Amino acid sequence: MTIGFPFRAARSTCVLCVAGLLTLMPAAAARAGRPDPGPPGGPRAAVQPSLLHRSGIQVRPLPGAPGVPEVSALSWVVADAGTGDVLAADDAHRRLPPASTLKTLFALTVLPVLPGGIRHEVGTEDLSGIGPGSSLVGVVEGQTYRVSDLWNGVFLNSGNDAVHVLASLTGGWGATAARMQAEARALGARDTHVRSPDGYDAPGQVSSAYDLAVFGRAGLRRADFARYCAKVDAMFPGRDGSSYGIMNTNRLLTGADGVEPYPGLIGVKNGYTSNAGNTLIAAARRGGRTLVVTVMNPQKGGGHAVYEEARSLLDWGFEAAGRVDPVGSLAPGDVRLGKGPQAVLAAPAAAKPAEDEPGWPETGAILGVAGLGAGVVALALRLRLVRDDGS
């Protein structure tokens, strides 16, 4: 059964709700998925200085530690997703184009304010501005989609069309980019500069292996994010009530195109553009431990090298666990390098965002203008909310 709302009532409700959402969202989104620093005053190992801002491979091996594998990526990170400890890295803060791995930050920013059961009829303006050559899931103007279907399109098919529609539902392209920038800063990801929320190449748009690992770890602490990024396949709505199958483009998860699936892999996101090359955030669980690995732009081995290099880094990380001291932390500011208690994954954690971090004042100003202006107008005029018995 579908329940509709009169336009005038819906418009008033949307204006009030969205104004509140867009005002509170940076803080709410910042709280969801923040790394858990452990209990105050709890036991800590001796703090060692972070090595993550140094160039080249950084590792602190203990006796019996395996050697770090040789990989050709321009930058990479291996980290424990539970504690946030970085086990090894190579140019972790090198700023590079992220391609569609930036969609993880998009999801962290937008998932908290768009319930999956919302339905939206796609208009012409929702699909405007999609870059040529973009990956698409097949969103059609004039058709109504559930938000949950659009998220499948984002995570599985890396659909830029789905990203554009979801962004239009939360204030528009520019406002979404500004909120993503604020979320990145709140997470302690200072290398990331957002210009295009879908990860499409844009002048000045960069991230780093460190920041991508932060996004992947934060995403795994949200049950909805973890569920979407681990899906192998799903059905996507087609025309006239039909549907068609879509498959996750992360070959390390699916085993497609001759890539051997990695045992215990639970996501997260791959990407490719001609400027960024191949990029990947991969997470896997083994023996009660979860690792997150990021690989940016391998220089050898072709299109599948990003998966094989991630595989070798995951293998090394599981073997090296307990045999290396951390070289840094995914916690904001690299402040906790000791071996604190393991954080719970797939569940939001809370922490107060640091409002004095670089980039916060300008993104806050943009949010105030773009979010409360474009967001209210877009949602008040175009969003139609309905409740469905199966949502």
Image (cartoon, rainbow, N blue to C red):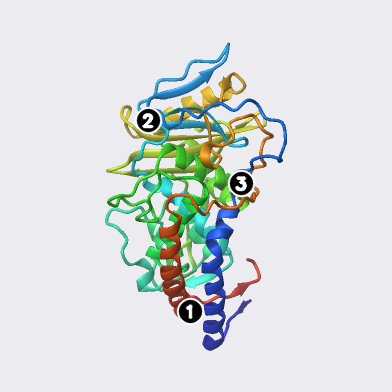
> Between marks 1 and 3, how big is the CA–CA gap?
32 Å
> Between marks 2 and 3, how big is the CA–CA gap?
28 Å
Residue 117 position by quadrant: bottom right
Asked if residue 181 lies left or right of residue 47, the reply is: left
Residue 363 position by quadrant: bottom left
SS under mark 2: helix
Q: Which residue is mark 2?
A: 305
> Mark 1 or 3 closer to N-term?
3
> Mark 1 or 2 closer to N-term?
2
Give me the disc on residue 302.
none
Give me the disc on residue 380.
1
Q: Measuring 58% from the left and 45% from the top, which residue is drawn there?
A: 220
Horizontal and vertical percent for residue 34? 59, 48
* Residues tagged 1 and 2 counted as in contact (Cβ below 8 A): no
Task: Using the image as rendered, state which of residue 324 and residue 120 is in the foreground.
Answer: 324
Horizontal and vertical percent for residue 45? 65, 26
Q: Which residue is mark 3?
A: 221
SS under mark 3: loop
Numbered-mark total: 3
Horizontal and vertical percent for residue 191? 40, 43
Relative to 110, say whether 65 is above or below: above
| Classed neighbour count for the residue bearing mark 2: other residues with Cα under 10 Å, few (<14), some (14–19), many (≥20) | many
> Mark 2 or 3 closer to N-term?
3
The three-letter amino acid code for the residue at tag 1 is Ala
The three-letter amino acid code for the residue at tag 3 is Arg
Asked if residue 239 lies left or right of residue 134, the reply is: right
Relative to 283, say whether 60 is above or below: above
The three-letter amino acid code for the residue at tag 2 is Ala
> Between marks 1 and 2, how big is the CA–CA gap?
46 Å
Task: Using the image as rendered, state which of residue 186 and residue 71 is in the foreground.
Answer: 186
Relative to 22, say whether 61 is above or below: above
